[in-house]
Image: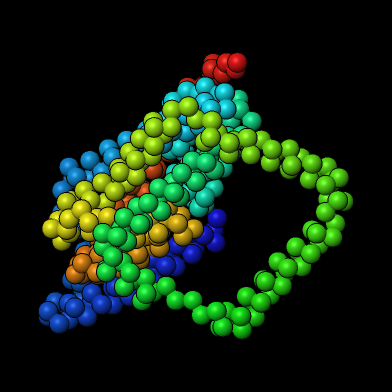
Amino acid sequence: MLVFLLFGLAILWFLYHDLSAKYLAECQLKGIPEVQCSLVDKVVQDFRSTKMIWLVIICFCFCISNISRSIRWQQLLSSLGYQTRWANSFHCVMIAYFANLGLPRIGEVVRAGSLAKYENIPFEKVMGTVAVDRMIDFISFGIVFMLGLLLQYDLLWNYILDHATFDLRRSLQNRYFLTVLALLLLLGMLIWRYWHQLLRHVLVKRIIGAGAGFLEGLQSLSKVQNKPLLIFHSVVIWGMYFLMTYFCFKAFEPTAHLGALAALLIFVFGSLGMIIPTPGGMGSYHALVIAGLVLYGIDQNDAFSFAMIIFFTINIFVNVFFGIFALILLPGYNRSYQPVRA
């Protein structure tokens, strides 16, 4: 947990340090005293200057997306024969977002474990449906990415060409890379050599049993009866994510003139930043959103303020509030609840 937190803080710190130096240089050119030129003060002032109604709408969009996510999750569970209460699925989703602020990706395990506990469903089956849920998200993001690539081809493709560099020769000459590769090959050879002995081990048998339940959870997608409804909720989830970026443009004066296509590209950049395993996308989200906004002529310092505004609105305020609320509410809500199984 500490490693991921420090990684996110390191990215954010280097980003802030670089932008702060540029901001001070800009102030010197304008003849503004250094004591009156703080990037932190600028971010605070920019946050205060936002049109709060748009931030409220952003929070509303986030809630709608998670209502659809919880209903979609219920569909996956229902296909396995488990009828769950919507409130449980919704609050478990919110707990997952809250947990991800502490340790990236742990939220999915916490989400599955919480629902398995309150709905009395085998954990491995619930985890399988969570994996399907994320697989649908991966496909959805692929569609959004392709839309961004097609509609803003020149800007996005030039950025990829400038930044996505991978030198295979240098990687093969890197001793750390070669060490990891050798260890993976050794591990593969050992598993191949002692495969039959491993299958007879008690722990491995338990893992295989859990894996069977997980695979059953993965099959939930093929068993969903109302697939158009599942697609509808997937569109709602990602449509709301896009609108959150677009409405944040409207909330902040320096970005208010940007349109829907710009919002789509910044949404793609921000989503890529969220993939990097830092708490809530800390640092990585900011860096990529700033890089995207600069392509549209937005000043880096204003872009930093924009990233902080949407980050704190959703990842800190909403996720913390709903996460703590769910943790308090769920035990009492399920105190006398006994799930009925067919």
Give x and y (percent) for residue 304. 27, 64
Q: Residue at x 19, y 45 (%)?
A: 54
In terms of depth relative to the viewer, which is nearer, 315 or 86? 86
Q: Residue at x 37, y 51 (%)?
A: 143
Q: Is residue 49 left or right of residue 292?
A: left
Relative to 29, say whether 289 is above or below: above
Q: Which quadrant: the C terminus?
A: top right
Q: Is residue 70 left or right of residue 147?
A: right
Q: Residue at x 45, y 62 (%)?
A: 8
Q: Is residue 78 left or right of residue 291?
A: right
Q: Which quadrant: the N terminus?
A: bottom right
Give x and y (percent) for residue 65. 35, 38
Residue 10 visible in the picture: yes
Relative to 223, say whether 145 is above or below: below
Give x and y (percent) for residue 212. 69, 38
Quadrant in the rendering for residue 227: top left
Relative to 295, say whether 328 is above or below: above
Q: Residue at x 39, y 43 (%)?
A: 319
Q: How many marks?
A: 0
Residue 48 visible in the picture: no
The colour scheme of the drawn protein is rainbow
Give x and y (percent) for residue 37. 20, 72
Quadrant in the rendering for residue 32: bottom left
